[in-house]
């Protein structure tokens, strides 16, 4: 995980003007800037960026139901 990620990671609660796709793009940009290459770390960072009802949705996903980053992005966009 990048150092001090919690202070600079874009946050998403699903309420503001940022769309789900825009948030994915922001997290991808963040991962590129921080040189995060491992998809498991990218998923973990993505989960740390979620707040409110979106965080509750993520927490309710079944363990092991996400197998890779593209699948996670699609599940996120479909919610």
Image (cartoon, rainbow, N blue to C red):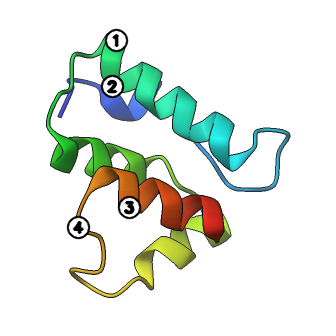
Question: Cα distance, mark 3 to mark 2?
Answer: 17 Å
Reading the chain from its start, which is encountered first: label 2 or label 4?
2
At a point 38% along the width and 35% down the height, the residue shown is: 6
Q: Is residue 28 left or right of residue 69?
A: right
Distance CA(mark 3)–CA(mark 4): 7 Å
The alpha-carbon separation of the residues under discs 1 and 4 comes to: 24 Å
The structure residue drawn at horizontal position 29% and vertical position 71%, both measured from the top left corner, is 66
Instruction: Name the one closer to the observer, 23 or 12.
Output: 23
Q: Which residue is drawn at 73% across and 56% down?
A: 14
Q: How crowded is mark 2: few (under 14 residues within 10 Å), some or many (20 or more)?
A: many
Query: In this image, 2 relative to 24: left or right?
Result: left
Label 2 to label 1, Cα distance in Å?
Answer: 6 Å
The tag earlier along the polypeptide, 1 or 4, is 1
Residue 71 in the image: state x and y as whole percent.
Answer: 38, 61
Residue at numbered disc 1: 33
**Residue 17 x/y as whole percent:** 85, 39
Say which residue label 3 marks.
71
- Locate residue 59, reporting x and y percent: 42, 77
- Determine contact: label 3, label 4, CB under 8 Å: yes
Q: Earlier in the sequence, mark 3 or mark 2?
A: 2
Q: In this view, does 12 lie above or below 51?
A: above
- Contact? badges 3 and 1 (CB < 8 Å): no
Question: Which is nearer the eye, 39 or 45?
Answer: 39
Residue 26 in sight in this render: yes
Quadrant in which the C terminus is drawn: bottom right
Pick whichever of labels 3 and 1 is earlier in the sequence. Answer: 1
Q: Quadrant of residue 11?
A: top right
Per the image, label 1 sits on a secondary structure element best described as: helix
Mark 2–mark 1 contact, CB under 8 Å?
A: yes
| Residue topped by disc 4 | 67
Question: Residue tagged by mark 2?
Answer: 31
């Amino acid at each position: 995980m990048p150092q001090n990620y919690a202070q600079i990671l874009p946050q998403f609660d699903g309420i503001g003007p940022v769309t789900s796709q825009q948030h994915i793009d922001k997290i991808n940009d963040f991962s590129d800037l921080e040189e995060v290459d491992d998809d498991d770390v990218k998923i973990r960072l993505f989960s740390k960026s979620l707040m409110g009802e979106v965080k509750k949705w993520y927490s309710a996903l079944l363990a092991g139901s996400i197998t890779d980053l593209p699948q996670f992005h699609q599940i996120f966009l479909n919610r």
